[in-house]
């Protein structure tokens, strides 16, 4: 960063510190006014000040200011207005905020630093000369031009133009063509002025005589435009905006609308350093004028502004046909979901939560202004729409796969070695489901930023959509590429301060080399995709490099997938039963599981065929087959063991099926079994995906007498709200916790889950018990049920009937 830029940042922070003192005083004054007479205006002003500080504190390097202000703002909005002045929590929070503001301002700190007025960093009005001997014409246009941000220098005498230009140095001129000196006097004087002073600013000629001679004189005088009277003020404003736009660099134009001067100053500086042309206003009424004048390619609008809400301003903007395609991004320190949804619904516009880190601001802006300009170019050039929108990912500003393919083809043509990496985030869909799409978008932007920071200048990062990122690495060294992949995974695993939620981020990476020069881009990308799928299936080291075996595995997977329907028709899937014992060591019941012996490939693991059945929409057929067989077998066994129960896993389609309760009752009646004999096991993912409908369905099943078990608890984005909001009877602790009981941290977490479940009056089943030591620890905590290979693997009916499990006196635990 240049020294001048550093000085600007320094001056901005000093100015911000000065403003903190003034805001602290203003907060105290309004609080006193509120206590004296419950002044609604004072309360509104307190809300406004706390909202501003919540958005500006962090970006200036004072996160505690944002934190205290955000908490205060939330309290002020949530407490009834008449009770605010007496609320103890608000008083304490307000005192903390004022103390924090005063901590960041001291006379000693500012004394040795020159105070830089805001004008030194701001924008002066553009000077233009308007020459017309008609005073009514000058008066008619002056107000609109000044409202658009121009400083108008009026002249009635064309002979004064030379001296005025030399003294005022205007940026442009509007000049009448006809004066008493002649019908082309305006052009004649301008030609003389150019020769005398060498000026070359743009000029717009206006005239009541629209003749060929008048237009020819304007051209010879080097004019930019000729307009016949009567002239529209808006036409003049638009022409001036086009003429005064720098043509050399042609930077992207951005309009910032925010009533907080500190935020405007910070974002303007950050964007100007990145090369953008920035226009600012803290007055929503002036925003529309600036948009018409400058035609920005992106507008960032704060939601909470006095007198006009940001969404209202957005709707006003969208009423103008010439502004309807300009993208708008709304900003706010308020996390209100309703406002986010409203912002998104407004013409497809978007929402970004304050405080916005500079890198994220640049990422958001770059993606949108580039696409905005591309779409504008579409109107002037013969281009296909798909190519325009495929160049850039609008969320992360990264190039898309359309460009990845072009880059691969270029490298192949030049026989340059490279590697393709496909990176896929693990369980990203749950982030959207649990925390919302706003957090999901922020997560993707953060990932893009972290990945980009690890690459060399010659390497490239791409994203099309979803949670998949692609990398093109210019290297032939597989070891170096694998080290880079490891570095990428490590960076993603580091906690990001951008999130309020504690999201543990992980990913899987597939590598593919360019050894085969005959393979096209699609083939190489498919190979990287195969490697990534292999990495995702393997726990632990989630990086895989493509090899020919993966192709055969894909082929095998395809053949298995094609044989699923016939296997269901042939009832080739058969049930196995894993014993579940109670705390007294007696057999409580069985978990019903399915197995498949493929005619060509032999035993197919459930981890393979269950996801395939779900992909094909066939999982419910398997559930029904297992229910028929399992309940018939249970009815037979209960003749000897009348309290025996059966647990069966239900998938998302099973729960979504409105006929499920009726089907279960029919099957139970057929076997003369009570509802209490069947336990329905569901996973956390079902609660997430079916959250809008799951409660009533589970309550209905519970009322019918079924027990509900939450399976694999702790493996996903576990939430205690599941246990409180849903009618769950049994909590099944995932085997990953049980297997790590020797680790003190895992042990404490497992025992905490057991204690919590007991407090909520839930039964607890420990899955994956394989060692006596694990069993002893769980027994000490009075876990209710146990399941795992320590007792038995899943057994067929024949194996069970040859064992001791079905004996009435079967007791396997040392109690």
Image (tube, grey):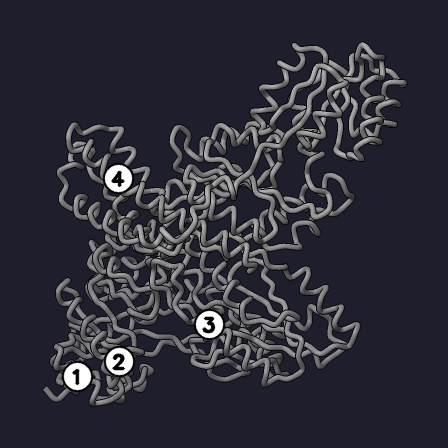
Vertically, is 107 above or below 502? above
Q: CA distance from mark 1 to mark 4?
A: 57 Å
Along the polypeptide, which appears first: circle 1 or circle 4? 4
User: Which residue is situated farthest in the left direction here?
Assistant: 815
Q: CA distance from mark 4 to mark 2?
A: 54 Å
Task: Report crowding for label 3: few under 14, some 14 to 19, many 20 or more residues within 10 A (C-alpha).
Answer: some
Please name the residue shown 67% across and 43% down the image. Answer: 375
Residues at circles 3 and 1 in contact by the CB criterion of under 8 Å? no
Vertically, is 149 above or below 120? above
Residue bearing mark 4: 27
Regarding residue 539, the answer to whether it shows in the image is yes
Task: Report crowding for label 4: few under 14, some 14 to 19, many 20 or more residues within 10 A (C-alpha).
Answer: many
Task: Report crowding for label 2: few under 14, some 14 to 19, many 20 or more residues within 10 A (C-alpha).
Answer: many
Regarding residue 801, the answer to whether it shows in the image is no
Task: Report crowding for label 1: few under 14, some 14 to 19, many 20 or more residues within 10 A (C-alpha).
Answer: some
Please name the residue shown 74% across and 47% down the image. Answer: 384
Along the polypeptide, which appears first: circle 1 or circle 2? 2
Residue bearing mark 2: 738
Along the polypeptide, which appears first: circle 3 or circle 1? 3
Vertically, is 731 above or below 194? below
Residue bearing mark 3: 491
Please name the residue shown 72% across and 39% down the image. Answer: 379
Quick one: SS at disc 4? helix
Instruction: Give the camera-side residue of 426 and 767.
Output: 426
Q: CA distance from mark 1 to mark 2?
A: 10 Å
Residue bearing mark 1: 777
């Amino acid at each position: 960063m240049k020294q001048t830029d550093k000085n600007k940042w320094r001056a901005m922070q000093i100015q911000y510190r000065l403003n903190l003192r003034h805001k602290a005083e203003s907060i105290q004054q309004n609080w006193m006014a509120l206590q004296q007479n419950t002044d609604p205006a004072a309360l509104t002003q307190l809300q406004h000040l706390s909202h501003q500080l919540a958005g500006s504190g962090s970006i200036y390097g004072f996160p505690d200011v944002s934190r205290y202000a955000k908490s205060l703002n939330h309290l002020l909005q949530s407490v009834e207005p008449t009770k605010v002045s007496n609320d103890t929590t608000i008083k304490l929070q307000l005192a903390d905020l004022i103390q924090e503001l005063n901590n960041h301002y001291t006379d000693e700190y500012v004394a040795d630093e020159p105070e830089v007025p805001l004008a030194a960093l701001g924008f002066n009005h553009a000077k233009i000369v308007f020459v017309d001997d008609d005073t009514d014409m000058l008066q008619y246009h002056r107000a609109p031009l000044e409202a658009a941000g121009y400083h108008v220098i009026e002249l009635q005498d064309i002979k004064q133009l030379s001296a005025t230009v030399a003294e005022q140095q205007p940026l442009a001129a509007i000049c009448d063509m006809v004066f008493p000196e002649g019908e082309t006097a305006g052009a004649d004087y301008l030609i003389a002025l150019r020769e005398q002073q060498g000026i070359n600013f743009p000029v717009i000629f206006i005239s009541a005589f629209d003749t060929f001679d008048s237009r020819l004189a304007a051209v010879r005088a080097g004019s930019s435009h000729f307009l016949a009277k009567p002239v529209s003020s808006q036409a003049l404003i638009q022409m001036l905006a086009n003429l005064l736009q720098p043509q050399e660099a042609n930077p992207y134009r951005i309009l910032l609308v925010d009533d907080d001067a500190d935020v405007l100053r910070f974002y303007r500086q950050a964007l100007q350093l990145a090369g953008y042309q920035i226009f600012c206003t803290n007055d929503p009424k002036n925003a529309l004028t600036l948009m018409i004048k400058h035609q920005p390619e992106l507008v960032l609008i704060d939601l909470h502004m006095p007198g006009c809400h940001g969404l209202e301003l957005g709707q006003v903007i969208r009423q103008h046909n010439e502004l309807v395609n300009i993208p708008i991004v709304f900003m706010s320190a308020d996390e209100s979901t309703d406002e986010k949804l409203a912002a998104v619904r407004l013409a497809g516009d978007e929402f970004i939560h304050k405080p916005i880190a500079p890198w994220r601001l640049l990422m958001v802006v770059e993606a949108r202004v580039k696409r905005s300009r591309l779409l504008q170019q579409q109107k002037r050039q013969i281009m296909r729409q798909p190519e325009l929108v495929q160049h850039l990912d609008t969320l992360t500003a990264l190039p898309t796969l359309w460009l990845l393919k072009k880059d691969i083809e270029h490298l192949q043509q030049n026989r340059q070695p490279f590697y393709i990496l496909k990176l896929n985030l693990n369980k990203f869909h749950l982030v959207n489901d649990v925390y919302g799409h706003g957090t999901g978008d922020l997560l993707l932007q953060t990932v893009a930023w972290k990945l980009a920071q690890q690459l060399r200048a010659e390497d490239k990062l791409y994203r099309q959509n979803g949670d998949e990122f692609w990398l093109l690495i210019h290297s032939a060294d597989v070891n170096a590429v694998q080290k880079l992949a490891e570095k990428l995974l490590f960076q993603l695993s580091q906690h990001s301060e951008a999130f309020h939620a504690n999201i543990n981020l992980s990913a899987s990476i597939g590598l593919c080399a360019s050894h085969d020069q005959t393979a096209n881009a699609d083939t190489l990308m498919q190979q990287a995709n195969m490697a990534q799928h292999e990495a995702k299936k393997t726990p632990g080291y989630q990086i895989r490099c493509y090899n020919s075996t993966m192709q055969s595995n894909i082929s095998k997977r395809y053949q298995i997938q094609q044989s699923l329907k016939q296997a269901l028709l042939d009832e080739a899937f058969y049930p196995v039963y894993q014993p579940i014992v109670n705390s007294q060591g007696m057999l409580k019941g069985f978990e019903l599981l399915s197995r498949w012996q493929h005619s060509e490939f032999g035993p197919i693991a459930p981890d393979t065929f269950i996801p395939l059945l779900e992909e094909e929409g066939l999982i419910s057929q398997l559930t029904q087959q297992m229910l028929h067989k399992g309940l018939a077998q249970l009815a037979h066994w209960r003749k000897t063991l009348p309290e025996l129960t059966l647990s069966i896993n239900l998938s998302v389609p099973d729960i979504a099926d409105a006929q499920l309760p009726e089907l279960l009752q029919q099957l139970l009646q057929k076997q003369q079994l009570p509802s209490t004999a069947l336990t329905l096991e569901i996973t956390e993912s079902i609660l997430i995906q079916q959250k809008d409908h799951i409660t009533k369905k589970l309550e209905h099943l519970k009322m019918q007498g079924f027990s509900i078990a939450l399976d694999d608890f702790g493996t996903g984005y576990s939430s205690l709200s599941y246990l409180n909001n849903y009618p769950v009877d049994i909590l099944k602790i995932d085997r990953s916790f049980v297997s790590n009981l020797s680790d003190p941290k895992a042990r404490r977490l497992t025992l905490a889950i057991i204690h919590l479940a007991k407090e909520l009056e839930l039964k607890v089943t420990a899955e994956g018990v394989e060692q006596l030591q694990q069993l002893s620890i769980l027994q000490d905590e009075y876990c209710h049920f146990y399941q795992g290979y320590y007792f038995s693997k899943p057994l067929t009916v024949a194996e069970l009937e040859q064992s001791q499990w079905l004996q009435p006196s079967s007791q396997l635990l040392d109690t």
